[in-house]
Image (cartoon, rainbow, N blue to C red):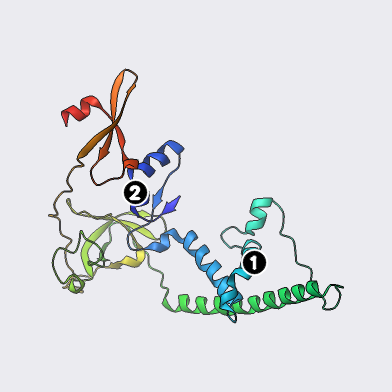
Amino acid sequence: MVSDRDVTFTSAFWRELFRLSGTKLCFSSAYHPQSDGQTEVVNRTVEMYLRCFTSAHPTKWMDWLSWAEYSYNTSFHSSLKTTPFEVVYGRPPPRLLPYSPGISKLDAVDIALRTRDQILQSLGQNLLHAQQRMKATFDSKHRHVEFQVGDRVLLKLQPYKQLSVGTRRHQKLLPKFYGPYKIEQRIGPVAYKLEFPPGIKLHPVFHVSKLKLFHEGDFPAAATLPSSLPEAPSPHPITVLEHRVVRNVPEVLIHWQHTSPAEASWETVSSMQQR
């Protein structure tokens, strides 16, 4: 599973749950929420569907929610090479039969089917225009960048959002580029691991969009990441919640400072006495 670095997923509770479930949790690289792209794309796609459905009547978006679901599940996905419907059910999605006005004997059915066809026709046109606009915007800004292991690159950061980098006042005026740092490893096609000096409290994996090839003398204003940051204090136990004995070893359930009771962990009595 891929997620961002929210404390919900980095907490001891979720790490232990994932470990016992046999699930590997991969975190997105720093300052690049697109790494968790599948969820973001699904959210944007559903939002785009609803926007295209209800462009003329935005207050009626709930009326067209089922059609947005149908359109998404029956559309061809380039990542799946098929439709979500066929992935789940193992067969192609059913097709909607076109309706000729006046065939139904019931006026309410006639109105409902005519409205359905009008909405789906309008949706197709709106989606096509939206896709064309998004493709043009992406193509105008996209550039292919690739580095090799051993290259020296500059790292682009936002110090006012990264507490371990912003160490003085007026953080928005700090340099945007730090380095240069050597590329230690390539992580997938668009992420790289940097070789940081000891003591830097920053995750070393970054998306390619945050890196820039370093040339001698090109960036005299590039700064160096601070390495003398204070160490985080060790967690302090507040109270013992429960006792148990596992394989003749006494253990206690410790509630730690600055955490919720759900983050309590079982520790051996001997280790707690030593601490």
Residue at screen point 75% across, 64% down: 95
Q: Is residue 217 visible?
A: no
Residue at screen point 36% across, 63% down: 32
Compare marks 1 and 2 and give the one earlier in the sequence: 2
Residue 71's disc is 1
Residue 10's disc is 2
In space, the residues marked 1 and 2 are separated at their CA atoms by 35 Å
Per the image, label 1 sits on a secondary structure element best described as helix
Vertical placement of residue 200 versus 220, above or below: above
Tell me the crowding category of disc 1: few under 14, some 14 to 19, or many 20 or more residues within 10 angstroms, Cα based.
Answer: some
- Residue 153, horizontal then vertical, whole percent: 26, 64
Q: Which image quadrant for residue 155?
A: bottom left
Tell me the crowding category of disc 2: few under 14, some 14 to 19, or many 20 or more residues within 10 angstroms, Cα based.
Answer: some
Vertical placement of residue 168 versus 84, above or below: below
- Residue 208, horizontal then vertical, whole percent: 35, 64
Per the image, label 2 sits on a secondary structure element best described as helix
Whether residue 3 sits left or right of residue 239 in the image: it is right
Residue at screen point 64% across, 76% down: 123
Whether residue 116 sits left or right of residue 138 in the image: it is right
Q: Amino acid at mark 2?
A: Thr
Residue closest to the eye, 267 or 259: 259
Vertical placement of residue 267 versus 38, above or below: above
